[in-house]
Amino acid sequence: MKKIAVLTSGGDAPGMNAAIRASVRAALYNHVEVYGIIRGYKGMIDGDIKKLESRDVSNIIQRGGTVLKSARSEEFRTKRGREKAYKNLTELGIEGLVAIGGNGTFTGAEIFMKEFGIPTIGVPGTIDNDLYGTDYTIGFDTAVNTALDAIDKIRDTADSHDRVFFVEVMGRDSGYIAIQTGIGGGAEMVMVPENPDSIEGVIDTLSAGRDRKKSSSLIIVAEGEDLGDAHYISVKAKEMLPNMDIRMTTLGHVQRGGAPTAIDRILGSRLGLAAVEGLLEGKKNVMAGVINDQVVYTSFHDSINKKKPLNKDLIKMVNILSI
Amino acid sequence: MKKIAVLTSGGDAPGMNAAIRASVRAALYNHVEVYGIIRGYKGMIDGDIKKLESRDVSNIIQRGGTVLKSARSEEFRTKRGREKAYKNLTELGIEGLVAIGGNGTFTGAEIFMKEFGIPTIGVPGTIDNDLYGTDYTIGFDTAVNTALDAIDKIRDTADSHDRVFFVEVMGRDSGYIAIQTGIGGGAEMVMVPENPDSIEGVIDTLSAGRDRKKSSSLIIVAEGEDLGDAHYISVKAKEMLPNMDIRMTTLGHVQRGGAPTAIDRILGSRLGLAAVEGLLEGKKNVMAGVINDQVVYTSFHDSINKKKPLNKDLIKMVNILSI
Amino acid sequence: MKKIAVLTSGGDAPGMNAAIRASVRAALYNHVEVYGIIRGYKGMIDGDIKKLESRDVSNIIQRGGTVLKSARSEEFRTKRGREKAYKNLTELGIEGLVAIGGNGTFTGAEIFMKEFGIPTIGVPGTIDNDLYGTDYTIGFDTAVNTALDAIDKIRDTADSHDRVFFVEVMGRDSGYIAIQTGIGGGAEMVMVPENPDSIEGVIDTLSAGRDRKKSSSLIIVAEGEDLGDAHYISVKAKEMLPNMDIRMTTLGHVQRGGAPTAIDRILGSRLGLAAVEGLLEGKKNVMAGVINDQVVYTSFHDSINKKKPLNKDLIKMVNILSI
Amino acid sequence: MKKIAVLTSGGDAPGMNAAIRASVRAALYNHVEVYGIIRGYKGMIDGDIKKLESRDVSNIIQRGGTVLKSARSEEFRTKRGREKAYKNLTELGIEGLVAIGGNGTFTGAEIFMKEFGIPTIGVPGTIDNDLYGTDYTIGFDTAVNTALDAIDKIRDTADSHDRVFFVEVMGRDSGYIAIQTGIGGGAEMVMVPENPDSIEGVIDTLSAGRDRKKSSSLIIVAEGEDLGDAHYISVKAKEMLPNMDIRMTTLGHVQRGGAPTAIDRILGSRLGLAAVEGLLEGKKNVMAGVINDQVVYTSFHDSINKKKPLNKDLIKMVNILSI
């Protein structure tokens, strides 16, 4: 393999730049030419592809976002679009791909690879940590720390005013961010899609806290919580506990950005390197991940379709620790 | 004057603890006993007042919120409530008050002082910077930096996806936070209550940015913007610019908390000290502020009723710098 | 077991407060009384021991340092000192101990336990990550992120001035902090006690970087590096590369403090809980750790005497990624 | 004036990029072509000068360091070197200069301007805040906040171990950083070149703190303190107070870098803009500064030679507040 290309796709995640840098330098280290595809599959179709040298990825490891940019591409969902993409790659002589992103990215890569046979290795870059085949995805640790920093600030206010705060964090399909910020933020309760919750449970928790003379309470709600969003739940709670000073806030898009944490830079670096080494060893159609501190490769099929379970001991831990 | 008391009231602001610490230590330095009133006027009525020593305010200068807590008090709006408060103060022999807070705090202090004659000096503690008689209020610089930190993160995402972001920051009556975060965040436009804005102006700005090949745009909206909130404005913009990827986020309560910046710790320290020195010199019914790096005292009447103008050159600057 | 006590000993580490909070609340959750021993073994001898309730550990999870304080105790090295300590514990009816700290802490605990038979479970709290029996120690992730934040700042200057910087990070016996900050900081080289280094190697790396038109270079030196400290190495490098602008800095004590990261709060929480659960299940003389995301208990003997190896692949990775 | 150039020189300071961005965009807004000179006077001599467009300064306002780089230039100290520089500027048709830096930068600019008559306006960019003609220099507020962040971390450790810490901060000729971090960090004492200090004074302060049961003490030492550096002073203090646990740390180069604070971004923006507007109005040989929130222009002669006094009330305040 003499030429490969790297792309990022899907929502950006802190640490993607570390993975890009590692892929580029691992390629060059192995005397492989390397190209960057701008805006993921869209750039592949548009031919927005440029040769990268080592200096092009200098001084990016500490930056949030992705220097290769990301975009949706409806056209890549069509056969015709993918044909254009393939033509662009072959014209440049690109023989392998590193695709950094999430579920949608890998789904696209799998279809493309089946049709045109270009070996592809995926790198899990998404803040949600919802991919099977790796303990953590790139960006998750940064998102949790960003959320935690916000929660520390909210607690200052909650405590000064004896308030209850409902805080909504990201996680459409997964409670990973919620559970980690809940434990780290010393929350009284964490509401995640993986666990059944009820308004009664919320009321019980808040009432019990009040009886134990808690001066303030935090309840973390995952974006994908079945019971409703944080706004809805806080309104319900206010109706039933009219004497409590109850507020809510949604952390929103800030959770995606910012300088990556050490963990995300190292994970991005390891997996960017592992993707290139995998390609050179002839692997394809797999996602590189780290499980128990070892690099492992999982088929796209499994990483897309299998569900990574949430450790429910952690939910139980929230109850014990908020006593 | 041999005994004074300190309270915080209204919304908490980072740097209030620096002001509390400075008031307590300035009192002790001048051989004056000092009491802390818990939860502002509510605690004054409930008699929740405790003697403070120097060690009680150790290691608080770096903390957000207020260790004396804050609360609303409907009862203090009644004559009867204020009589209870006065009785509690006289029983302890308290002869002067330092009241840290905003407009509402000073209004309460002025009424109380007129009725019962206890000399009071106000310290401006509010993130909104909307008080006449001081260049900056305690908490404003921290709130701006917190908002800026969030905006830096959002720009990572905006830039990675070529998006437009509307970001709503605090400031119900004042565009101070918006204008400073707008300049500091490199925003394309800032929408504040002090300035007339129109959807057409928003569309023009975004269209012009697109024509100049800007890859992303940020528009900062003050909470009190006349045209509507950031959600409303972003929806309108989407209708008129359907091809742009337009998002919005409301920063919310995180802007209130967090470790205070250097400026807020120093301002809090100077004004807490100035309040006590003012009381000892016989001043009363005034707010201590810093104008042009000098401590000045402004009557509660003026600080409550006069309007601090926003420097409109700064709004113009946003336009020039986003070219 | 109806009464236990918790102590911190050795150098403070961010996340110790999370472990204290978890131990206290896990005890109370299990209807066990819990005491805090102030200043570790010194406080045990001095009888500086106080009963803790749930509210005593509120709002500490986000704080650096240890609310139970830490101190050296020469007296605890004597039989007589330990007898005093035992007497104080028995007078209060304390039947079990949670000892949060490092190697020295566990050595003390083991001797004490052998002499007096009080069951003790250790919790690994040290920024150095040099304890066998756990993937990570509490405080390590925070220290690495603090060092990384400093290195990002230094790179701003290095890059603006085309400089070489030697940065010394903590780690007297272990290169863990150095290797992680090296990868995360995009360093050109990492010098750790586990790996043989030479001045010639340093010169080669810097010369090669210059030849590849690197505008700046960072070399991370672990405190315990055999070749000498960062000052010594930078002086040698300057002698041999007089045309390069070479600087050095020692990060020092800042690496110990600060709000703990999510990882350290969660690890502290899990292990504080695991220590109490271990005591209640009859375990003793062991350290609670997390290996491959599972709680495990390792005998004090092994945790003190066995050496946790540094993953040398990571050193190799630095070379590849700095090409 | 149809073409101008911008350069940064001297030590880098956070906020320089905001000033570069503002100069570039203010020039383009006024239909003036603008060039960036790389590595200050060195680049002027080497002809390392490139035309800048608006997009070249996108997304830099939040970055530490300077994208135009900085370097020493011995050659610019010679007439011959300056002649080369002049030739390069005239060949490009450059009619005016914006020089961002400190004392040395302005001294160079003044000589160059006298010899060759190219109008130059200076922008004060240095973390030391030691320039006459502006309340604050660009970078100062960020440096103070960075130092403060480090001091907060050190206090966690100091407090956990009942230690005394001497912390050396930057400021070779000026105690500005020391005094602001001292007040903001709640230090017991601040040692600055502007004030006479003695070891006896240090001992008295520490002894008094011990008598008042302070659990920990921080003493901030400016780099330029007459009595010696923090290492020397801490050794002397240890000799005289052998029972205290005394440590020291030098914050070093981290104080120069990092994302600029709001204040520094806004100051940089205002002054970059003011420099260009000044050039267009025919001003020259002056430094743009902000005094009492108004832009003012001070002759290079005064800004170089006059001394900005340190407000000694602030030193007194440290004593009162550390009681």
Image (cartoon, coloured by chain):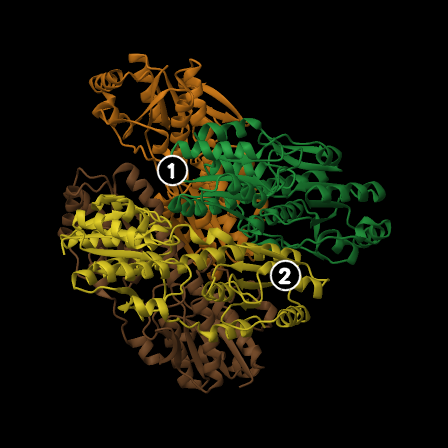
Chain colours: A brown, B orange, C yellow, D green
Q: Which mark is residue B138?
A: none
Nearer to me, C119 or A25: C119
Q: Is residue C58 left or right of residue C189?
A: left
Q: Is residue C97 above or below residue A285?
A: above
Residue C70 point in image, percent of width and height: 35, 49
Residue at the disc numbered 1: B60
Q: Secondary structure at mark 2?
A: helix
Q: How many residues crowd mark 2 within 10 Å: few (<14), some (14–19), many (20+)? A: many
Q: Is residue A43 visible?
A: yes
Q: Is residue A244 above or below residue D259?
A: above
Q: How many residues crowd mark 1 within 10 Å: few (<14), some (14–19), many (20+)? A: some
Residue C82 point in image, percent of width and height: 28, 53
Q: Chain of mark 2?
A: C
Q: For residue D133, what is the image quadrant?
A: top right
Q: Is residue C269 left or right of residue D38?
A: left
Residue at the disc numbered 2: C234
Residue type, label 2: Ser
Q: Is residue D154 above or below residue C229?
A: above
Residue C257 point in image, percent of width and height: 42, 50
Nearer to me, B201 or A101: A101
- In the rendered image, which quarter contains the N terminus of chain B? top left
Residue sitting at 44 percent across and 40 percent down?
Answer: B142
Q: Secondary structure at mark 1?
A: loop
Q: Is residue D25 left or right of residue A240?
A: right
Q: For residue B121, what is the image quadrant?
A: top left
Residue type, label 1: Ile
Q: CA distance from mark 2 to mark 1?
A: 40 Å
Residue at the farthest front position: C80
